[in-house]
Amino acid sequence: MKMIRNIAVLFSFFLAEALGQNYKLVWSDEFNGTTLDQTKWSFETGNNGGWGNSESEYYTDGTQNCSVQNGLLYITAQKQSYGGYDYTSVRIKTQNKFSFEFGKVEARMKLPYGKGIWPAFWLLGDNISSVGWPSCGENDIMEMIGGSGGTGATGSALSDSTVYGTLHWYQNGNASAGGKYSLGSGKFSDDFHLFGVIWTSNNIQFYVDSTIYFQVNTSPSAMSAFRSRFFIILNIAVGGVWPGYPDSTTVFPQTMQIDYVRIYQDTSDSATGLVIPPGPPKGYSLSQNFPNPFNPSTHISYQLFADSFVTLKIYDLLGREVETLIEGRQHSGDHTVTFDAGNLPGGVYLCWFEAAGYTQVKKMILMK
């Protein structure tokens, strides 16, 4: 079921080509394991003086607040006394493990709900430790201040059906610009939605699902922070000056479910101002299968720079999984597997390769 939900990324390769773009998936976490991949993420723990927002939670690295199962990451806020605070939750980041400049950044998530609940998917400038905030820049791809009525400290409506996208930068203090998106019916806790931004050297567009709801021209020199590398953060805060604090209506525990986080970059010749970070370590690569076109079988080769957990699957163009060829840990070196399609109808198929956080998709044609 998890990989079937990934149909959007499979078709994005063909859609991008049709639109004259060449979006390449440069980093992702599909949360297919059983624990958080700490080669990609680090936990931030503690309360840190309320994280600048008078928050009420204590962030832990415990399984009661963070788990990975069934292809999903679960970040859970608990009503639990810990470290002198009344709530626990999780805050994870890719700082010092992955950062990037420009691209399409998105996560498919199902959000929590309730007064005082504040889930977020956001980016901070890599240079925060040297220049501080807000000079480093902040891109809040998705924030929700939960509730079903009333307003937060800044007058924003408390709502489980509205999310906000906001930029922060330094311009004689904290400058910001933002927009919001509301569902026509229901809450963001009812189902999964796609939250993302399209970030170029002079513009950032915010979207939910297929709707771009807000954009900012970032070309002014005061917004130069948005022409530098950023890292990713996911968290649920509890309480704070913006959402207010939980009350008797707030139900605990509250969980944010994350299906995936993906970063794409446009590597086409026509793209300007893009800085593509170093690619995967040399040796992580999927070769074109041979023969191609083929009937009834073909050989698929790939290289592993180091011992890695490898996923190699075949899909049809409807996003349906046809066969799992490899799903497990393998030693470094050259590998070849055979895909026997004797029982399949002719047509175009997709080979999905993932190792060490690197993903490639190749097209193959079965001639019958």
Image: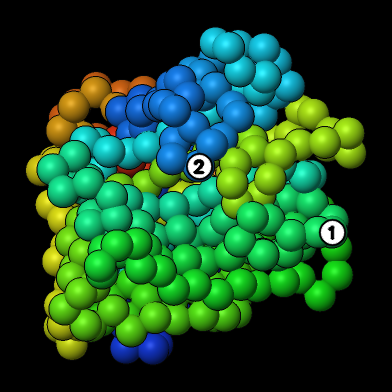
* Circle on res. 245: none
Please provide percent x and percent y for residue 14: 42, 77
- What's the residue type where badge 2 is placed? Asn
Answer with the quarter of the image where residue 248 lies.
top right
Of callouts 1 and 2, the N-terminal one? 2
Neighbours of disc 2 within 10 Å: few (<14), some (14-19), many (20+): few
- Would residue 133 be seen by someone viewing this image from the given angle? yes
The mark tally for this picture is: 2
Q: Nearer the viewer, residue 179 or 232?
A: 179
112 lies above or below 343: above
* Circle on res. 53: 2
Q: Identify the residue at horizontal 79%, vertical 44% (top origin).
A: 114
Q: Nearer the viewer, residue 296 or 22?
A: 22
Residue that numbered label 1 is attached to: 149
Q: Nearer the viewer, residue 231 or 350?
A: 231
- What's the residue type where badge 1 is placed? Gly
Q: Are marks 1 and 2 in contact (CB under 8 Å)?
A: no
Using the numbered discs, state the Cα–Cα distance from disc 1 to disc 2 in whole angstroms: 21 Å
Q: Identify the residue at horizontal 47%, vertical 66% (top origin).
A: 166
Q: Identify the residue at horizontal 61%, vertical 22% (top origin).
A: 88
Q: Residue furthest right?
A: 249
314 lies above or below 218: above
Neighbours of disc 1 within 10 Å: few (<14), some (14-19), many (20+): few
